[in-house]
């Protein structure tokens, strides 16, 4: 028998919707979750400035220096991460792995230059990726809608919760609109997570 458009959705769909609504987090819980995630994933300095992905170079240098060296030949971000990691190691008088030591010497002699970025590409920072990721988590785990109508009286979307958390932490963007605009660009900010 062909399904008519007026047929009700299957009971499983209704049950899933009801379960999602009953598991929906309160707005206060969503804000608290967003604050905790922002603090955890921020990698902030004492001045609350977001550190860019170059700080990941230290982790990569410890775990897979050969991959970092290989990526640094082609990717500007990896080059900066390696350069930063080498500088940190030198500041602390810590030894550098063999290949990285040779790279540092070549770089200091001016034999190595940073790879160039393709014209027209923009960089996103870790803060933007964290904000988009947290909105996504509030939608997925907290049952909140990502956005709301701008004129809505009840302001309880995931973007509202993240903007409230950012305001409480005295960080930018502090407005619903600022977080919403990042969410709208999520496929460009975090293509690995949202690419279609």
Image (cartoon, helix red, strand yellow):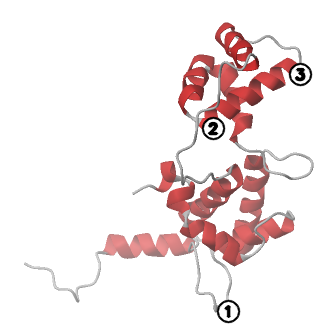
Q: Is residue 74 placed above or below 15 in the rendered structure?
A: above
Q: Residue at the location (57% across, 56% down)? A: 189
Residue 164 at what x, y percent from top left?
77, 72
Instruction: Provide the secondary structure element on which disc 1 rests.
Output: loop
Quadrant for the C terminus, please: bottom left
Quarter of the view holding residue 117: top right
Vertical arrangement, residue 84 with respect to residue 131, above or below: above
CA distance separating discs 1 and 2: 43 Å
Residue topped by disc 3: 91
Mark number, residue 187: none
The disc, 1 or 2, on the residue closer to the chain's N-terminal end is 2
| Sequence-wise first label, 3 or 1 | 3
Question: Considering depth in this image, is 93 or 131 the residue closer to the camera?
Answer: 93
Residue behind mark 1: 153
Which is nearer the eye, 159 or 124?
Answer: 124
Q: Are marks 3 and 1 in contact (CB under 8 Å)?
A: no
- Front position among marks 1 and 2: 2
Identify the residue shown where x is 77% and y is 63%.
32
- Report the disc number at residue 77: 2
* Residue at 85%, 67% in the rendered image: 168
């Amino acid at each position: 028998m062909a399904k008519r458009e007026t047929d009700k959705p299957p009971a499983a769909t209704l049950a899933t919707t009801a379960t999602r609504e009953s598991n929906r987090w309160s707005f206060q819980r969503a804000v608290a979750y967003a604050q905790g995630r922002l603090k955890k994933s921020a990698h902030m300095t004492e001045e609350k400035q977001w550190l860019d992905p170059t700080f990941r170079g230290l982790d990569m240098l410890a775990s897979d220096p050969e991959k970092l060296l290989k990526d640094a030949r082609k990717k500007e971000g990896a080059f900066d991460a390696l350069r930063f990691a080498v500088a940190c190691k030198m500041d602390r008088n810590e030894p550098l792995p063999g290949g990285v030591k040779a790279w540092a010497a070549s770089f200091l002699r001016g034999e190595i230059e940073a790879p160039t970025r393709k014209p027209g590409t923009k960089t996103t920072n870790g803060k933007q990726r964290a904000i988009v990721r947290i909105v996504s988590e509030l939608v997925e785990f907290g049952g909140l809608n990502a956005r709301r109508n701008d004129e809505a009286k009840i302001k309880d979307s995931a973007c509202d919760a993240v903007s409230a958390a950012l305001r409480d932490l005295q960080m930018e963007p502090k407005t619903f609109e600022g977080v919403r605009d990042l969410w709208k660009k999520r496929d460009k900010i975090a293509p690995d997570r949202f690419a279609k």
